[in-house]
Image (spheres, rainbow, N blue to C red):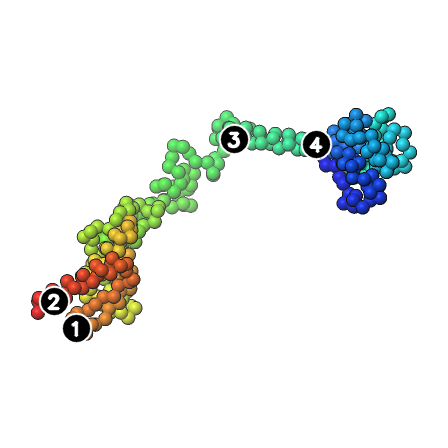
Amino acid sequence: MPWFVVDDNADTHPKMIAATNAALGLWLKCGAYAARHLTDGIVPGAVAKMYGSAPQIKKLTAAGLWHTSGHDCSHPKCLQPAAGDFVIHDYLVYNPSRRDVLAKRERAAAKKRKQRAVQDAREGLEAFGGESHENRGGFDDDPDPNHSSEYDDPAGRGGASPRDSRGTRTRATPSPPLPSHQGGADREPSAGGRGRDPLSLIAADWQPSDEDVAAAQLARADAGREQLTPQQIGLVTRKFRQRMLDDQVRAAGFGGRWQQWAENERTEQPAVGGNVVHLPAMTRGQQQRAGLDRLAQQLDGGHTA
């Protein structure tokens, strides 16, 4: 739908000032009517009388904003209206003509029809499985390197592609499964690995494997830290199990996590007694449980003495 164009200096134009506001309201409404109905600026007399009054029409014609039938305006684009009708001065100077609007609409419609035809052709081709018109019969006389046989194993699934030569492609073999230990140093396998254990919580009696302990001790030695004693390893394991349970951690294996935990433990010699393990920051409940464990160890040591 075209717009009725109003110049941005219209408010200061002498003709607009002479017409006064009430008549300009009629001018604007009839301009919108002409743009909507593609009249090239012609305002039927009945429409003018319906939208405004006779004095307002007289002010528009007196100001030169409208012309009546037989006007002598020198501008070539001011059409001659029929008797009783009016024409908006310079309408076709600022607004498109009926012919231009209809031609633009036809071009837009033709473009849309072309786009729909292309889309219909694509959808029709996809309905035949994406094949060309010449090969819709399904015959495969010319081997296609991109074509996979429905009777042979596809490439990369246990064998070579049906069309690959023995000298250009090696036989595909599956990757070996990752080793698994009871709580061992098995890092969690990738999503595509085989033999992946279901994720689960840590067992209440979980213990690190010998490989886990050896790996943690080796990492501590490389970092210049003291080796953990069996008593410290037991304490670290108890704290590790409790942290995993408190955090509701689910994993296929906990060996790797325990190695990192044990690797980062710090030890020091207290004034009296054995080694004390300083654990990472714990919650209040964990701190209370740690205090009870230390108290139990002290009582056991005093009873032994």
Give x and y (percent) for residue 262.
26, 62
In this rendering, position of residue 165 left or right of residue 50:
left
In this rendering, position of residue 76 left or right of residue 217:
right
Q: Secondary structure at mark 3?
A: helix
Query: How many angstroms separate mark 3 from mark 2 (CA)?
Result: 82 Å
In this figure, which residue is indicated by the disc labeled 4? 105
Given residues 105 and 121, the one toward you in this image is: 105
Give x and y (percent) for residue 113.
64, 30
Q: Tell me if label 2 and label 1 are in contact, CB under 8 Å.
A: no
Mark whose residue sits in front, 3 or 1: 1
Q: Residue at x 12, y 65 (%)?
A: 299
In this figure, which residue is indicated by the disc labeled 1? 272
Instruction: Determine if residue 92 is in view.
Output: no
Mark whose residue sits in front, 1 or 4: 1
Q: Secondary structure at mark 4?
A: helix
Give x and y (percent) for residue 176.
30, 48
In this figure, which residue is indicated by the disc labeled 3? 126
Q: How many C-alpha atoms fall within 10 Å of the one at disc 2: few (<14), some, or many (≥20)?
A: few
Query: How many angstroms separate mark 3 from mark 1 (CA)?
Result: 83 Å
Is the C terminus in the top left, top right, bottom left or bottom right quadrant?
bottom left
Q: Amino acid at mark 4?
A: Arg
Q: Secondary structure at mark 2?
A: helix
Given residues 195 and 110, the one toward you in this image is: 110
In this view, 280 is above or below 5 = below
Q: Which badge, 3 or 1, is on the more N-terminal residue? A: 3
